[in-house]
C-alpha cells in the first residue's frame, strides 16, 4: 500500500504544494547549513531542496497510508527541529530523523491509527531493533516533551514564514532563479495580530502590577516612619499613615472643567 501511494505521488505532474511544506523545506535546508560542515559554505542548490521534497513525499505517503491529515507535517518538523537544536544533524541522518519524527508524531497525535514499528521497519528495510533504538533516542532528544497547543503550532508556522528571510541571507553569493518569498496567509496574519494584542495586554498588566507594588512599598515606608501617640502608658508605639501617604492612597477631587 505504501509503495502504491508513493508511486501515485511520484506520477503527479503538478503536485499540490502546501505553503507550509515549502517553507518547511527552507527550514530543513537551514539545519544542514548550520550543523553539517559539508554545507556550511554551500551555494544555494535546488538539488538540496528537491532531495528534501522527496523525503517530504515519503512522509506524506506514510500519513496517507495511516489515513492521517497532511497537517501533521508541521508537528513532525517541530519535533525534528527540537531534536536538531539539541543534538545537531548531518545530511546522511536527515531521512532517519524525519522518519522517526513521523512515527513518534503519529503515535502521539493519532488516536484512531495504531502505528506498528515492525511494519515501518519492513517498508524501509530497517531492523525492528534499529527502529526502536531511533525512537528512544529521538524521544530522549526532545526530552519526552511532545505537548503542543494550536497556538504553539500556529506560532511555529509564523516563525517559518519569518525564517525565509534569514534562510536566504545564509548564502553569501546571489543566485539565479531564487525561490519566491511566500506571503503569510490571511488567517496567519490574524493570528499574529491576536498574539501581538495579547502580548500588549500582558505588558500592560505587568506595568500595572509594578505600579501597585511601588505604591504599596511607599505606603509601608511612610506608615513605619510616622509614629502616633500611644493610647496608654503601657502600650507600645502605634504607627499610623501620615498625610503624605494618605495623599497617595486617597483619590483627589478633580474639577470637571479640567
Image (spheres, helix red, strand yellow):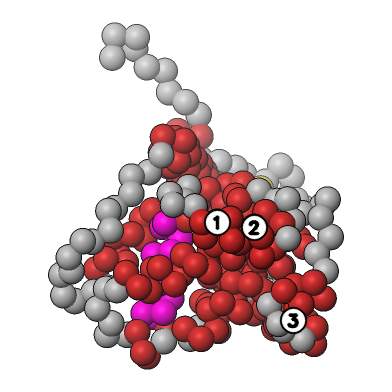
| Quadrant housing residue 159 | bottom left
Classify mark 1: helix, strand or loop.
helix
Residue 156 location in percent, x, y? 50, 55
Q: Quadrant of the N terminus?
A: bottom right
For the point 63% across and 72% down, which residue is it?
A: 99
Of residue 212 and residue 11, the one placed in the foreground of this image is 11
Q: Gap between marks 2 and 1, in whole Å?
A: 6 Å
Q: Which residues are magenta?
A: 22-34
For the point 59% across and 61% down, which residue is it?
A: 7
Residue 164 location in percent, x, y? 33, 59
- Sequence order check: which comes first, mark 3 or mark 1? 1
What type of secondary structure mainly makes up the magenta span? helix
- Residue 246 lies, with reference to residue 171, above or below; the image says above
Q: Quadrant of the C terminus?
A: top left
- Residue 254 lies, with reference to residue 36, above or below; the image says above
* Label 2: how many Cα within 10 Å (few below 14, some 14–19, many 20+): some
Residue 57 location in percent, x, y? 54, 62
Name the residue carrying label 2: 5
Q: Gap between marks 3 and 1, in whole Å?
A: 25 Å
Amino acid at each position: 500500500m505504501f509503495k502504491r501511494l508513493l508511486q501515485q505521488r511520484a506520477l503527479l505532474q503538478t503536485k499540490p504544494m502546501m505553503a507550509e511544506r515549502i517553507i518547511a523545506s527552507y527550514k530543513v535546508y537551514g539545519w544542514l547549513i548550520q550543523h553539517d560542515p559539508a554545507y556550511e559554505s554551500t551555494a544555494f542548490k535546488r538539488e538540496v531542496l528537491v532531495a528534501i521534497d522527496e523525503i517530504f513525499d515519503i512522509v506524506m505517503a506514510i500519513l496517507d497510508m495511516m489515513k492521517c491529515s497532511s497537517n501533521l507535517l508541521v508537528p513532525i518538523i517541530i519535533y525534528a527541529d527540537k531534536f536538531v537544536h539539541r543534538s545537531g544533524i548531518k545530511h546522511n541522518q536527515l531521512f532517519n530523523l524525519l522518519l522517526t519524527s513521523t512515527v513518534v508524531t503519529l503515535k502521539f497525535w493519532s488516536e484512531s491509527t495504531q502505528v506498528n514499528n515492525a511494519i515501518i521497519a519492513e517498508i524501509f528495510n530497517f531492523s525492528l531493533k534499529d527502529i526502536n533504538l531511533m525512537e528512544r533516542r529521538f524521544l530522549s532528544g526532545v526530552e519526552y516533551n511532545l505537548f503542543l497547543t494550536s497556538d504553539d503550532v500556529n506560532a511555529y508556522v509564523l516563525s517559518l514564514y519569518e525564517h525565509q528571510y534569514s534562510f536566504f541571507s545564509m548564502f553569501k553569493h546571489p543566485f539565479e532563479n531564487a525561490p519566491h518569498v511566500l506571503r503569510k496567509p490571511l488567517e496567519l496574519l490574524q493570528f499574529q495580530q491576536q498574539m501581538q494584542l495579547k502580548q500588549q495586554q500582558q505588558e500592560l498588566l505587568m506595568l500595572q502590577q509594578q505600579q501597585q507594588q511601588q505604591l504599596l512599598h511607599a505606603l509601608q515606608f511612610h506608615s513605619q516612619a510616622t509614629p502616633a501617640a500611644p493610647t496608654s502608658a503601657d502600650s507600645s508605639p502605634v504607627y499610623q499613615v501620615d498625610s503624605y501617604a494618605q495623599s497617595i492612597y486617597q483619590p483627589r477631587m478633580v474639577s470637571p472643567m479640567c
